Amino acid sequence: MIGCHTRFALRQGGLTLIEVLVSVIILLVGLLGLAALMTNSQKAEAESYQRAQALLLLQDMVGRINANRAVAACYAVTTDASTGTPYLGVGADVSTLVCGVGSATANTRAIQDLSAWSSLLAGASETSGGTNLGAMVGARGCVTAPNPNPDNIYTVSVAWQGLTATKAPDATLNCATGLYGDEKLRRVVSIPLRIADLD
């Protein structure tokens, strides 16, 4: 009788070990899924943060143009709407900016606005160890105007590099086209701006 009871206890102990192993495997799969979920959540949060920064920079330039509307044409630095160049921000050369419309004071302010916006796009508002960190990854800004522009409509755009490939931007949003490798990584926010003729 004792031998039978011992064999049953050993068999029962073996079943318990298998149950524990299965439980550990299920727990491991669940933890791996949780880790993947957390990683995707962090990427989505970073994408959302970059978009919020881009919208702030977009509104910043719209405000600058509105405040100096007499020389709005000076802000239209992006002359090739098909490629979105030239642009301001990362890799831009602001030393070549010129403005020949309106008064000298308004011209100077327009150049200062464009230079300041370029610095903000390049992340100069926040630095660490000499590295700019205050903006989106590879941020660039474009201001375009059709030529001729009888309706005084300008398009202000901000482009940056996303963290994961999604859908390529609409064909009409060409700011910084081809500068981020895969077009599915390029993110763009844009707003049309109409300058009223108050004369």
Image: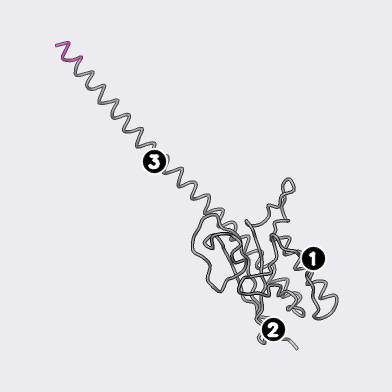
Look at 66% across and 66% down and name the residue there: 141
- In the foreground, 136 or 195: 136
Total labels drawn: 3
Q: Which residue is mark 2?
A: 196
Residue 33 is covered by the magenta coloring: no
Q: Position of residue 183 (x, y in %)?
A: 54, 63
Quadrant of the rendered structure where residue 152 is?
bottom right
Look at 56% across and 53% down and name the residue there: 46
Mark 1 and mark 2: span between their CA atoms?
30 Å
Mark 1 and mark 3: span between their CA atoms?
56 Å
Crowdedness near tag 1: few (<14), some (14–19) or many (≥20) residues, C-alpha within 10 Å = few
Quadrant including the C terminus: bottom right
Mark 3 and mark 2: span between their CA atoms?
59 Å
Q: Position of residue 62 (x, y in %)?
A: 68, 72
Q: Which residue is mark 3?
A: 30
- Please indicate whether residue 184 sits to the left or right of residue 55 in the image: left
Q: Farthest residue to the top: give it.
A: 2
Crowdedness near tag 3: few (<14), some (14–19) or many (≥20) residues, C-alpha within 10 Å = few
The local secondary structure at tag 1 comes to helix
Q: Earlier in the sequence, mark 3 or mark 2?
A: 3
Q: Which residue is mark 1?
A: 95
Q: Position of residue 50 (x, y in %)?
A: 60, 58
Question: Is the magenta region chiefly helix, strand or loop?
Answer: helix
Magenta residue span: 1-6
- Amino acid bearing label 2: Ala
Instruction: Answer whether labels 1 and 2 touch (C-beta < 8 Å).
Output: no
